[in-house]
Image: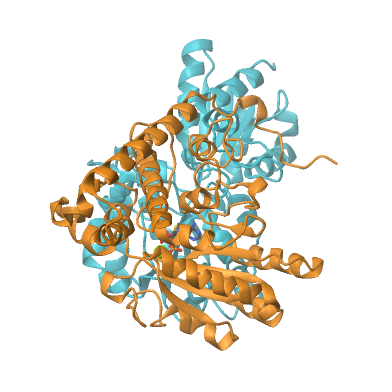
Amino acid sequence: MPTMTYAEALCQSLLDTCEAEPNLIFIPAAFGGLSPHAKSFAPFYARFRDRIYPAPISEIALCGIGVGAAIAGLRPVIDVLSASFLYQGIAQVVNEAANVHYMTDGKTRCPVIFHAMQGVLPGEAAQHNRCLSAELWNSPGLEIVLPASPEDAAGLWKTAVASPNPTVFMDHQLLMGMTAEVPAHVEPIPFGQARVVRSGRDVTVVATLAVVERAVRAAEQVEASDSISVEVIDPRTLVPFDEETIVQSVRKTGRLVVADETIRSCGVAAEVVARVQERCWGDLKGPIQRVTLPDVPIPFSRPQEAVVAVTPEKIAQAVRLVARYQ
Amino acid sequence: MSALREVLRRMLFMRRFEEAVIALFERGDFEGHYHVYIGQEATALGALDAIPPTDYMYTTHRNHGHLLARGADPTGLMAEILGKVGGLVGGRGGSYHAAWPEGLVPVTSALVAGNIPQAAGTALAIKRKGTDQLVVCWFGDGAVEEGAFYETMNLSAMWKLPVLYLCENNSVPAPYRAMGQYPSSTHAARSLTDVVAPFGIPGHVVDGTDYEAVRQLVTELAARCRQGDGPQFVEARTSRWPGSYGLWPAQTGGPFDVRWVWEPAGAPEEVREWTASSDPIVLLGQRLAAAGQLDPEGLSQLDQEVKGEVATVVEEALAQEDAPAAQTLAHVFADR
Ligand SMILES: Cc1ncc(C[n+]2csc(CCOP(=O)(O)OP(=O)(O)O)c2C)c(N)n1
Ligand SMILES: [Mg+2]
């Protein structure tokens, strides 16, 4: 199998889907953002320039244009660059796109894709670091996709393009350079199927997006230092959510840590914890731990940024804590 | 003319300050995205020299020049950019959110057009209180693409709010700077001043590289605004510095060399055309030289002084502690 970066795998998937779906268009297209790997998308820009509409800085109109274009049969991808800028367009995402199919009693479909990069980046401070998966999850009708590996980026993208529903596809600038073996032809990866990234016996860690890799590093640390065997699970899509894989894992390990870059209160981790305790109360050996951003905006100064960051060290600490319960 | 020599000195200070910011970033002294004001120095100085410190100001992601021209402490600004404890907002905001609440620059949004309705709201407060203040609201041409801009133009025109919208269009090719139209791939309008006309907001085009023109226009508009005439809109046109084209600022062609005032053709190729046609320091320097107010030795000496001042600013800012971890959770809410 060839080795590819996340950006290269996603680019290949863009090429494949544009080839297969003539109605797939992009308003605008800024894959890879400020990452040095943004240049890996050059083949896509070169080959499908006619599918791309350069656009003004008009998030609310662009998101709404995506809704209308999708309703009339295009497959529009609305690229708002950073998830933080999705707030500027949020009314069309959560209160228009999400409601279209339901409000029409299933008569109108709205297969728009909203694309953004989500995740905390160094030095980006309060306004450019917003993670919206929890707010989006709070709006029934949206599919939410968070690919954490090159193959997942490619395979989940294909499913997003084929989806009949509004889909928010959020990748992460820091993942663009991640390398892995990727099959020469990536199959679509169904939504709602978690990936067991690493198997283990003692503690289950659920993580999303850039935090998945940090959880794997934490798992390696605690295995080496404390002989704790950690299973890492990436749900891959929040909507639909694969509860079953996580529940099976927790029934085996009896211990759970949830690590995610949304805010602690009403965040993604809070929802995962709620679901697991509903189904695994008798299997849990102790309280579940969350590793999240605290309830505070992201500060600029480096020492303050380190206080709020979701790191492998903090995940490892939480794993050690839950491992003590017998 | 001696006053203009002082303007030249302040422009040079801004230029050397921004060059230092780029060098500090490239050395790894701070992280994150940031924006420099190179090429727009005359606009901030011209406009803010026409505005007393008792007026409010809202700036943007490209705020360094606005804050310096407003009179904010350069060491405080540099410390902010570096995330230091003595930064203008305690190292919390960095370059994106540098503000100066004590100097009536209450907060800085780095979201395009985020500040425009806020400026109108502050103008509403002023109007209700009946003071003769006004609000200066800076934004780029990109902000005229946002819906919030149009909604705020409508409201502030209806309510005749005392706000001066200063739109810095930094993407105008040199030949179009003083003319009525300019081509843009992201605006259907051929001139940004056309966009405010239907709201009854007077729109004015000014060459943003011309300190005196900007100062004169803003002086006049501020007086009208203060009289209760409602908002005014200025499009200050500059041409983008080649170092600001990439995703990150880059010291394209090396640091500015004051000898380019006498010999723009001596500038490195990457910046030569821009230097000759669009650099406000070169343009003002040439005017002063033509009037016999500036010679190469004098400018060189001025530059040495300014470089020394900026070096001290950098040194003092770097010597400060980083904004401390212990303060991370402070100020999410105000004390009762
Ligand atoms: C709402 C929003 N969308 C997108 C961005 C990303 N962004 C930062 S600066 C910029 C361009 C702004 O252009 P302009 O307003 O002309 O200001 P300039 O940088 O030219 O001074 C963009 C799109 C943002 N900060 N906020
Ligand atoms: Mg601009």
Q: Residue furthest front?
A: B292
Q: In which quarter of the image is residue B162?
A: bottom right
Q: Nearer the viewer, residue B246 or B220?
A: B220
Question: Residue B330 at what x, y percent from top left?
Answer: 71, 34
Q: Can residue A77 be seen in this view?
A: no
Where, by quadrant of the figure, is residue A50 drawn?
bottom left
Q: Where is residue A304 in the image (x, y as percent from the top left)?
A: 58, 31
Q: Residue at x 59, y 81 (%)?
A: A107
- Which residue corresponds to the image point at 60% horizontal and 71% vertical from the top-left? B222
Q: Which chain is orange?
A: B
Judge from the rendering whether residue B67 lies leftward or rightward of residue A75; answer left or right: right
Question: Quarter of the picture for ligand 1?
Answer: bottom left
Q: Nearer the viewer, residue B145 or B54?
A: B54
Image label count: 0
Q: In this view, does A179 lie to the left or right of A239?
A: left
Between residue A247 and residue A48, name the one nearer to us.
Answer: A48
Q: Which residue is drawn at 72% across and 24% down?
A: A286
The answer to whether residue B336 of the structure is visible from this angle is yes
- Colour of the chain lettered A: cyan
Q: Specify how the rendered protein is coloured.
A: by chain
Above-or-below relation of B298 to B238: above
Q: Quadrant of the N terminus of chain A?
A: top left
Instruction: Determine the image quadrant of residue B210.
Output: bottom left
Return the x and y of residue B41 as percentages of the image width and height: 40, 56
User: In the image, B22: left or right of B63?
Assistant: left
Residue beneath the point at 55% across and 74% down: B220
**Quadrant (top left, top right, bottom left, bottom right) of the C terminus of chain A:** top right
> Residue A266: x percent and y percent?
70, 46
